[in-house]
Amino acid sequence: MKSAIRSINPHISVDCVIFGFSTSQLKVLLIEREYLDEQGNMAKDFKLPGDFISTMEDLDHAACRTLEELTGLNDIFLKQYAVFGNPERISRPVDVNWLISTTGLPIKRVVTSAYFALINISDSKDEHAIKNNASWQDVQDFPKLAFDHGELIKRGLEHLRNALRNEPIGFELLPEKFTIRELQSLYEIILNRKLDNRNFRKKILKSKFLQQLEEKQVGVAHKPAFFYQFNKAVYEQHKKDHLGFNF
Amino acid sequence: MKSAIRSINPHISVDCVIFGFSTSQLKVLLIEREYLDEQGNMAKDFKLPGDFISTMEDLDHAACRTLEELTGLNDIFLKQYAVFGNPERISRPVDVNWLISTTGLPIKRVVTSAYFALINISDSKDEHAIKNNASWQDVQDFPKLAFDHGELIKRGLEHLRNALRNEPIGFELLPEKFTIRELQSLYEIILNRKLDNRNFRKKILKSKFLQQLEEKQVGVAHKPAFFYQFNKAVYEQHKKDHLGFNF
DNA sequence: ACAAAAGTGTTTTTAATACACCCATGA
DNA sequence: TCATGGGTGTATTAAAAACACTTTTGT
């Protein structure tokens, strides 16, 4: 937090719930926080990557900036999913004191705009080195969190599941080029169930949102898979034509 | 606005996009606003029902309160759908001056939490008398609006359509007891297309979310329709079991 | 030649669509 | 008795689900 050199708006913050998927598990990215407990001893817990916005900063910009500053991740597709404005959300003395000491301002109440994103953990290992105060934690069983960040994660996960079921957000959340198997794994991990690979390919390919590329996987010890990319224009057209309802 | 007698938080506001459906049209509820134009003349335009939150007030509470104060509507199911935090959203001199003169505070930047609701206009005629500075305007062709309220309506409508297609929000937005025809009309108006009544009933009733009541319409000049109510528990169970994806 | 994941087709089951008449009530 | 909207069934078409083997590559 660079509160000394930028003009912050201490009433509004952003928080980022970054989901990471590997081949077997869904994780969240958390930042380790040091704070003084009730006895004045140094203690540690975790928080989401987040910060106050700057006085003339757009919320989306603040979310991206914060994520980069705290974790080193950049160029991530972040989506705002809710605002948390309960006046009691910052009320525990340790949280209030931590905010006052890190900002130097008399913080009373903060409304936060929550963002989520989903990234491939194995990619992030090489491409985006994650700063060492940030770490991946199990999304089902995360450690004690600051503020109402447990609630933000829970709601973010619901939002992610819903989004995945109702629109092709999976494509947005994968790298530009991906294999169909990667997309299927993403669905399986987030929806938490196995899908039939033949039926999945049929359904996905019938929709024409995916374009097959020339390029194949290289160096894999099995038949190499073709890469695909998402064709957004075709999806938008489809959405216009298809006005049904599903629930 | 009772800014004189309550302690307001001038950084955060709520705005309500209230959709009203009659048998033929979708409308939005707008409040007439008087302001001083560039030449210092009194002029009029429209705004959404909205206000700054109070210092220790929950956002949902602020939205309900505001709606009641400005329109007389109460007990409406309001759903938060987005935050609008562009630093330029309040930049036109007429808007800035209007805020300063109505609050008496040096407003610079306001982040607003947007809510939407949908109500039956014919119901509201008798049950909820709408205050006379509020009026229903065509959702496709609304008058000139204050701030970025045109954008809030556009995004609210997208949200409403999406919500209706992907979850049984229709039930939430109708009175406790309603006929299947009312539900169908709601779908037709919002999705802007005709639906086959036999197929609609089949699909809706197959889902078991609806419970038929003993009660029928009275005083209608045709075969009276049964009233139904939404069974939320059955829906929640269904959502757990059905983890497919649709897009 | 073996292991590992990619890729492919058919049958069965379920859901969506298209379509037209009789029913109960108030005027 | 007429006008109005409520309520129903069937046949066709389209989509989802279930299911097992062959292909290509690296080791």
Image: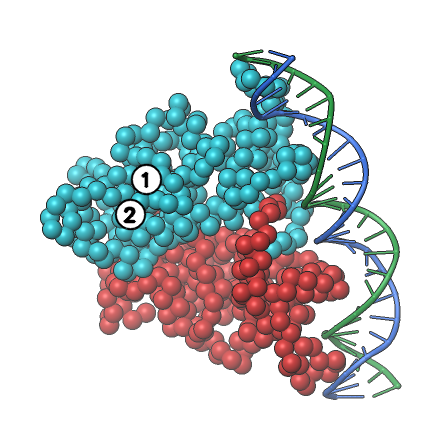
Chain colours: A cyan, B red, C blue, D green
The amino acid at mark 2 is Lys
Using a 10 Å C-alpha cutoff, classify the residue at mark 1 as few (fewer than 14 neighbours), some (14 to 19) or many (20 or more).
Answer: many
> Image height check: is A193 above or below B56?
above
Residue B216 is situated, as x and y percent measured from the top left of the image, at: 66, 81
For disc 2, the chain is A
Q: Which residue is mark 1?
A: A30
Separation of marks 2 and 1 at Cα, in angstroms: 11 Å
Q: Which residue shows up at 23% across the image and 57% down it?
A: A91
Q: Output the chain of dot 1.
A: A
Q: Residue at x 21, y 51 (%)?
A: A95
Instruction: Tell me where residue B159 appears, x and y as whole percent.
Output: 52, 54
Q: Nearer the viewer, residue A26 or A206?
A: A26
Q: Quadrant of the C terminus of chain B?
A: top right
Q: Residue at x 57, y 35 (%)?
A: A184
Residue A46, image x and y in percent?
Answer: 27, 43
Label at residue A144: 2
